[in-house]
Amino acid sequence: MKTLLLIGMGPGHPEQITVQAINALNRATVLFLLDKGETKDDLLNMRKEICERYIQAPGCRQVQVSDPVREDSAASYEAGVEHWHRQRAALFARLIDEELGEDECGAFLVWGDPGLYDSTLRILERVRALGGPAFAVEVIPGISSVQVLAAQHRIPLNRIGEPLLVTTGRRLEASNLDNVVVMLDARCAFSQFTDQDLEIYWGAYLGTEDELLVAGKLHEVGERIRRVREAARKRKGWIMDCYLLRRPLKS
């Protein structure tokens, strides 16, 4: 049976990939590389650097294809994501059918950890629903950007007796600001809460040479984060960031 490895590669630093992930890379006979376009060459180049550094087994073939682009002009966010996932499922089905031989092992290098805000597992479920050759899936966990955020700011994510919420900018609500990690926030949703007593720990391009970090009282550094974020996005053409938002502990 064909086997697919979903290998968590961490948030970008080549030394933040695990030994298990390196061993998995060296099992692969075919490595699928998704090209997200010229403005996001960094994402492809980081994957290639990891492959060049760690793959020692002979005979691994690299297949590079263009990744479908998610349209921001869709009637709703959910509709846009649904259409994008259908396109990606069709692409993955073709790759598995045409590029991966029976009993061969294919691999995708997944940014961060495959189980945290990544769509690859859901897309492979769609591929199975389409029919075609059977395949097994193995998931190799990776260091997430959330872990690197905490490490770089030298803070624990959790506090004693208090839950930690992980959500998206679209789901950020005033009722859940005690201790929350926010991902996928293109609109800087934290800006609507600058009138509250909150602390923010923000990071972008975590673990890479372009890493950006800002921390402080939200009402003091919120606007700075917006400016730094927008300037970085324009300079590089893309941005990946996340942040921890929390209320100070009462003394």
Image (spheres, rainbow, N blue to C red):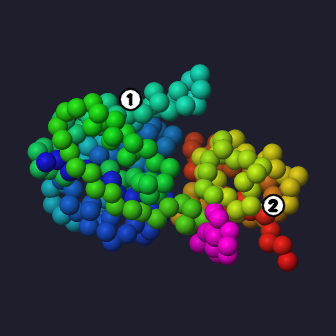
- Give residue 87's mark: 1
x, y (%) of residue 196? 86, 55
Residue sitting farthest toward the right: 195
- Residue that appears at 74% across and 61% down: 178
**Most foreground residue, 63 or 183:** 183
What quarter of the picture does the C terminus occupy? bottom right
- Relative horizontal placement of residue 133, taking residue 81 as reference (left or right): left
- Relative horizontal placement of residue 217, taking residue 50 as reference (left or right): right
x, y (%) of residue 140? 34, 61
Up the image or down, 54 lies above or below 139; here it is below
- Give residue 244's mark: none
Residue 61 visible? The answer is no
- Residue that appears at 73% across and 47% down: 173
Q: Which residue is mark 2?
A: 198
Q: Which secondary structure, mark 2? A: loop
Magenta stretch: dominant SS? Answer: loop
Sort mark 1 into few (<14), some (14-19) or many (20+) by Cα contacts within 10 Å. Answer: some
- Residue that appears at 50% across and 50% down: 117
x, y (%) of residue 247? 78, 64
CA distance separating discs 1 and 2: 40 Å
**Most foreground residue, 90 or 174:** 174
Q: If you read the primary sequence from the N terminus, does the residue marked by circle 1 or circle 2 appear first? A: 1
Which amino acid, by three-letter code, is at mark 1? Gln
State yes or no: discs 1 and 2 in contact (Cβ < 8 Å). no
x, y (%) of residue 231? 69, 47
* Nearest to viewer (mark 1 / mark 2): 2
**Region rendered in magenta:** 150-164
Up the image or down, 101 lies above or below 148; here it is above
Magenta residue check for 163: yes
**Most foreground residue, 23 or 233:** 23
